[in-house]
Image (cartoon, helix red, strand yellow):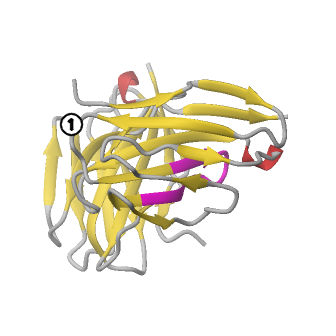
Amino acid sequence: TQLLEQSPQFLSIQEGENLTVYCNSSSVFSSLQWYRQEPGEGPVLLVTVVTGGEVKKLKRLTFQFGDARKDSSLHITAAQPGDTGLYLCAGTEDAGNMLTFGGGTRLMVKP
Amino acid sequence: EAQVTQNPRYLITVTGKKLTVTCSQNMNHEYMSWYRQDPGLGLRQIYYSMNVEVTDKGDVPEGYKVSRKEKRNFPLILESPSPNQTSLYFCASSLYPGGGYTFGSGTRLTVV
């Protein structure tokens, strides 16, 4: 069982649709990050959230950190084919030093 | 340009032949880490380092060694590679453990 559970694992949608990806855990995190990875490349950081209830926006992407700092969500509005990729959440537990990744959500946006 | 540089990008080797994958960062980051990425298993941490001469095991350290003699470099050493170490490896660095990570472009290792 992974420390961070992401859902869904796969998502295929049409251009213009909205979507939400979830990242859940029973552990409390001091910080939680979202990354996007293209095939054959390293993950690229999208956002870091550290405060319970925090909401951050990055153009059409909205990230939310749960009040209890155990979960997070990524919402994409009006998805575009350029959003296609693997989305990863990762967290550092309270008093921890390791960054642990969720299993990822593979998103495909069709034109 | 701020970056993490890994070498080589691709490597095919034979079982038992020692190899080193290099990793260097130019951001003066204290925290560096190695991950392997396998289908269905995601990204798993191998080793991490909080500063020079300070290293610790991650989730899957068996068969790997690391060293941190200088702040910028964090090489990954496979003393006797085996086929189950065939994987895509990433080095990453961060200013602090909870901060955002910058990843290298990856090293695809095949052990035959």
- Residue B2: image quadrant is top left
Residue A92 lies, in percent from the top left, at 34, 67
Q: Nearer the viewer, residue A9 or B75?
A: B75
Residue B46 lies, in percent from the top left, at 55, 57
Residue at point 62%, 62% (across, down): B60
Residue B14 lies, in percent from the top left, at 83, 34
For this view, does B31 lie left or right of residue B48? left
| Residue A101 showing in the rendered view | no
For this view, does A22 lie left or right of residue B47? left
In magenta, the rendered stretch is B35-48
Q: What residue would you read off at disc 1?
A: A60
Q: Nearer the viewer, residue B26 or A10?
A: B26
Which amino acid is tagged 1?
Arg
Residue at point 39%, 80% (across, down): A27
Name the chain letter of the residue that bears numbered label 1.
A
Q: Nearer the viewer, residue A39 or A96?
A: A96
Give the structural element (helix, strand or loop) at label 1: loop
- State which quarter of the image contains the C terminus of chain B: top right
Prevailing SS of the magenta stretch: strand
- Name above or below for residue A20 compared with residue B7: below
Magenta-drawn stretch contains B90: no
- Name above or below for residue A41 compared with residue B58: above
- Residue B64: image quadrant is bottom right
- Residue B51: image quadrant is bottom left
- Name above or below for residue B91 compared with residue B5: below
Residue at point 76%, 45% (across, down): B81
For this view, does A103 lie left or right of residue A26? right
| Residue B92 showing in the rendered view | yes
For this view, does B81 lie left or right of residue B97? right
Total numbered badges shown on the rendered structure: 1
Badge 1 density bin: few <14, some 14–19, many ≥20, Cα 10 Å:
few
Residue at point 59%, 55% (across, down): B65
